[in-house]
Image (cartoon, helix red, strand yellow):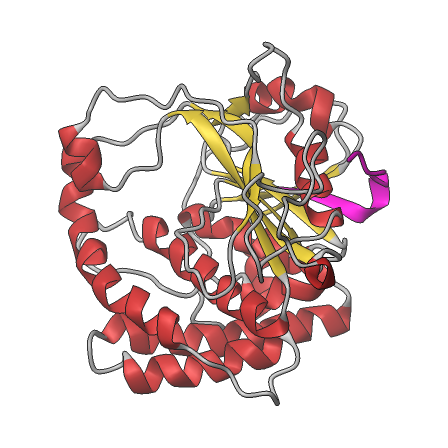
Amino acid sequence: MSVQIEDNEVDIVIGALRPNLASFLEAWRAFFSRFHLIIVKDPDMAEDLQISQGFDHQVYTKSDMERITGTTSINFSGHSCRYFGYLVSSKKYIIAIDDDCLPAHDTNNNLVDPVAQHITNLKTPATPFFFNTLYDPFCKGTDFVRGYPFSLRNGVDCVLSCGLWLNIADYDAPTQAVKPCERNARYVDAVITVPLNTMMPASGINVGFNREILGPAVIPGLRLVGEGNRRWETMEDIWSGMCAKVVCDHLRLGVKSGLPYVWRSGADSALESLKKEWVGVKLMENIVPFFQSVRLPRTAVTAEDCVVEMAGMVREQLGAVDPVFQNAAVAMVEWVRIWKAVGSRGD
């Protein structure tokens, strides 16, 4: 099913962690040039950004972050700078692709348009309450299978689209260490709705979402601590994705995973990552059971409500496990406050 995409309903958010953004933008020109780009420079990067001509774009820097958010405990350094882009956007849909990604080719060797596919995912219904064994029934060439209840075939609004990538697989450091040469070359031409009450490790590398509905639940919350630790990003988007999935389940909204693919070129040293990631690997054993058990009250009717309710649960149920959870609870409430403040000012 093809959908119409209006230029003024999509922002492309790019977290710039490398000075030379020009080559990245040139690779994406065919798919990005018609949309507004929000480029957020990592506040820890001292070098000037190199940006190609011919794009409708706005660059945000550390001074913009301080001006717009004011005093906050939220740190937008590293990959977290992408969240600032979500904050300042005014569009209905956001597509975010990391600056170490390039366009992928499908099985027919055609370049993949991730913007079009993400928007197709978001503009067609999701089916979280009953699994369709032919994947997304709203994709071309599929439909609902025999036995699928007709009462559920209208589906619900999809507000989160989690894309995949080729080449560098999204492994944690222990897995990467034992499979150092493994690359993902398998292109699966499919989209699925993630079932109700099922958690998944979402990634911010290649994602699209409905900012108007879900934006406040896409949270820069959980940060690991430790000397020289710059790998908290590997936990932050997982935490954010689980928060978003709980919100979607509670509000009866949908999440899709699968297409579109991008080609990811970056990879950190598995050994160095292992030193910095191990705390996060252990914390996942507490994080997953927590999110699996979260049930929000009926009085939580917006994403903002849900995030504030969850923050209280994080503080009460996980706060004694590790101080990072106390900090995450504070950041969740802070994020909602900033989101409302920026929205009311129209920044």
93 displayed left or right of 27: right
Q: Residue at x 33, y 61 (%)?
A: 223
For the residue pair 111 and 44, the one nearer the viewer reads as 111
Report the magenta residues as a range: 1-14
Q: Is residue 71 visible?
A: no
Q: Residue at x 48, y 72 (%)?
A: 72
Place of residue 7 in the rendered image (x, y in percent of width and height, measured from the top left): 84, 39
Q: Residue furthest top?
A: 109
Q: Residue at x 69, y 40 (%)?
A: 143
Q: Count the marks: how many?
A: 0
Quadrant (top left, top right, bottom left, bottom right) of the N terminus: top right
220 displayed left or right of 135: left
For the residue pair 308 and 123, the one nearer the viewer reads as 123
Place of residue 95 in the rendered image (x, y in percent of width and height, measured from the top left): 64, 43
Place of residue 49 in the rendered image (x, y in percent of width and height, measured from the top left): 55, 32
* Membership of 130 in magenta stretch: no
Quadrant (top left, top right, bottom left, bottom right) of the C terminus: bottom right
Q: Residue furthest front?
A: 147
